[in-house]
Image (tube, grey):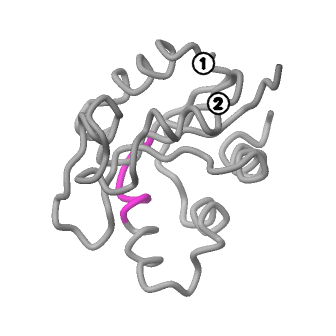
Amino acid sequence: MTIERSLVLVKPDGFQRGLTGEVLRRVEAKGYALRALAILTPTRGMLEQHYAEHQGKPFYEALVEFMSSGPVTAAVIEGEDCVKGFRALAGATNPTDAAPGTIRGDLGRDWGTAVQQNIVHGSDSLESAAREIGIWFPQL
C-alpha cells in the first residue's frame, strides 16, 4: 500500500463560484482524507515559489495575477495513489476537453481569459506534492 499526500487548490474562479464544498465532497467521496485545510489569498511570493518552473513563460504573469486575484482553498489530501487519483478526478487541464464526471468536465468551461481558469490544481508528482505542501502548509 502506498499512502501519498497531495496538494489540492480550489483556485479563485472555483472559490468565487462557491465550488469549494463540491470539490471537497468529491475528494472525500473518492475516499481521500483531508489532512489540512486553509482559505487564503496567496501572496506573490508564494505563487513565485509554487510556479517557479513556469517563470519566463508567456503565461506566467497572467497566471500569478489570476491566482492572487482572490481567495483560494488549499488542502492536503491523503490516500492510496492520491496524486494520480486526484488528477484523474480533476480532469483535463482544458475544461472543454475534460470528460464528464470530472471536476473540470462537470463544472468548468473556457471563459476566454488569458489564463485557463479551470477550478482546481492538483500536484503532478510526489516530488511536486512535497514541495507544494511545504509552500502552502509549512507547518506540516
Name the residue: 20% across, 50% down: 109
Binning the other alpha carbons within 10 Å of mark 2 as few (below 14), some (14 to 19) or many (20 upward) gives: many
Give the secondary structure at mark 1. loop
Q: Quadrant of the C terminus?
A: top right
Residue 13 vs residue 28: left or right?
left
**Residue 71 belongs to magenta span:** yes
**Residue 2 belongs to magenta span:** no
Instruction: Give the residue type at disc 1.
Output: Tyr
Numbered tag placed on residue 82 in the rendering: 2
In this view, the residue in front, 76 or 137, is 76
Q: Locate residue 4, reporting x and y percent.
A: 76, 30
Report which quarter residue 138 is drawn in.
top right
Q: Locate residue 53, reporting x and y percent.
A: 65, 73
Name the residue: 71% across, 45% down: 129
Question: Outermost residue toward the left?
Answer: 112
Residue 62 vs residue 46: left or right?
left
Q: Which span is picked out in magenta?
A: 66-72
Instruction: Give the residue type at disc 2.
Output: Cys
Name the residue: 34% across, 34% down: 103
Give the secondary structure at mark 2. helix
Query: Label 1 belongs to which residue?
Result: 32
Q: Are marks 1 and 2 in contact (CB under 8 Å)?
A: yes
Q: Locate residue 119, reporting x and y percent.
A: 35, 45
Binning the other alpha carbons within 10 Å of mark 1 as few (below 14), some (14 to 19) or many (20 upward) gives: many
Name the residue: 26% across, 30% down: 18
Tell me how far mark 1 sits from mark 2, CA to CA: 7 Å
Report which quarter residue 2 is drawn in.
top right
Nearer-N-terminus badge (1/2): 1
Q: Locate residue 97, reporting x and y percent.
A: 28, 53
